[in-house]
Amino acid sequence: MLPLAATDPHPVIVQNAGSSSPYLIICDHAGRRTPAELGDLGLPPAEWERHIAYDIGAAGLSERLAAALGGACVIAQVYSRLVIDCNRDPARPDAIVETADGATVTGNLNLSYEARRGRVEAIHTPYHAAIAAELDARAAARTPTSLVLIHSFTPAMGGMARPWQVGVLHQGNALSLAALRWLQARPELTVGDNAPYAMDDIDYTAPVHAQGRGLEYLELETRQDLIADAGGQDRFVELYAEMLRGIVPR
């Protein structure tokens, strides 16, 4: 197992555990830390400022949205997706990438089975265990629960501009479709329906924790340049809070 040093943070931050709010906010790519043992994975500092390391603006958006929704519980991942992507099945090769948007992650090249397993056991497993534990507690308390999964995306990828401000990733569930209709009715927004990404068998968190328990979920992608600072985050918090209050039973 990959040892986390005494100075390494716990892989999961849980805020407002046991909240009676009907929303549970999940942020898979909130952080960009690496365990001390792994250092910088062979990447220069500039790469750690890019989207390849974390979802820019997603952590602040999650925390502010939770506050706006009356203290909803937030569960966030501390370590960078370059260490291990917690929105991937840990058995998938791309759970630990060797290249990311043109950058070679030398610290991830030619990993042994034991090295991969160490990252899973140290980071991926406790993160998802924390989500499961909160959901178990909410089920025991009979607290209605809808998962809200917060991500961000780049304004362009592979030389192609992405015109959307917001995307809803889904597989046709009721809450996602209600949110999609609500957002599409806003004339100032260009809204992606399963864009810039589509929810498919690559996703892990929503299928395991929401679909696996028969819970409603909403996976929101917000363009990172729009939520990179507190002012932008607050604008989208106002938008999303209004939407959720209108479409989620309380």
Image (cartoon, rainbow, N blue to C red):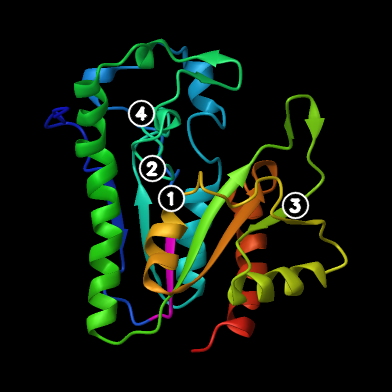
Residue shown at the point (75%, 73%) measured from the top left = 181
Of callouts 4 and 1, the N-terminal one: 4
Of callouts 1 and 2, the N-terminal one: 2
Front-most of residues 168 and 68: 168
Judge whether residue 150 can be spotted in this image.
yes
Mark 1–mark 2 Cα distance, whole angstroms, equals: 6 Å
Front-most of residues 161 and 197: 197
Mark 3–mark 1 Cα distance, whole angstroms, equals: 24 Å
**Where is 215 relative to 161, above or below?**
below
Percent x, y of residue 176: 62, 69
For discs 2 and 4, the disc positioned in front in the rendered view? 2
Q: Which residue is mark 1?
A: 204
Q: Which mark is residue 165?
A: 3
Chief secondary structure of the magenta portion: strand
Instruction: Report helix, strand or loop for mark 3.
Output: loop
Q: Which residues are magenta?
A: 21-26
Instruction: Report helix, strand or loop for mark 2.
Output: loop
**Where is 53 relative to 178, above or below?**
above
Q: Which residue is mark 4?
A: 83
Q: Relative to residue 185, is residue 214 drawn left or right?
A: left
**Where is 77 relative to 239, above or below?**
above
Mark 4–mark 1 Cα distance, whole angstroms, equals: 16 Å
For discs 4 and 1, the disc positioned in front in the rendered view? 1
Percent x, y of residue 86: 38, 43
For discs 3 and 4, the disc positioned in front in the rendered view? 4
Q: Relative to residue 223, is residue 132 drawn left or right?
A: left
Estimate how packed mark 2 is, as few (under 14), some (14 to 19) or many (20 or more) residues with alpha carbons within 10 Å. some
At label 1, the amino acid type is Tyr
For discs 3 and 1, the disc positioned in front in the rendered view? 1
Q: Which residue is mark 2?
A: 89
Front-most of residues 243 and 233: 243
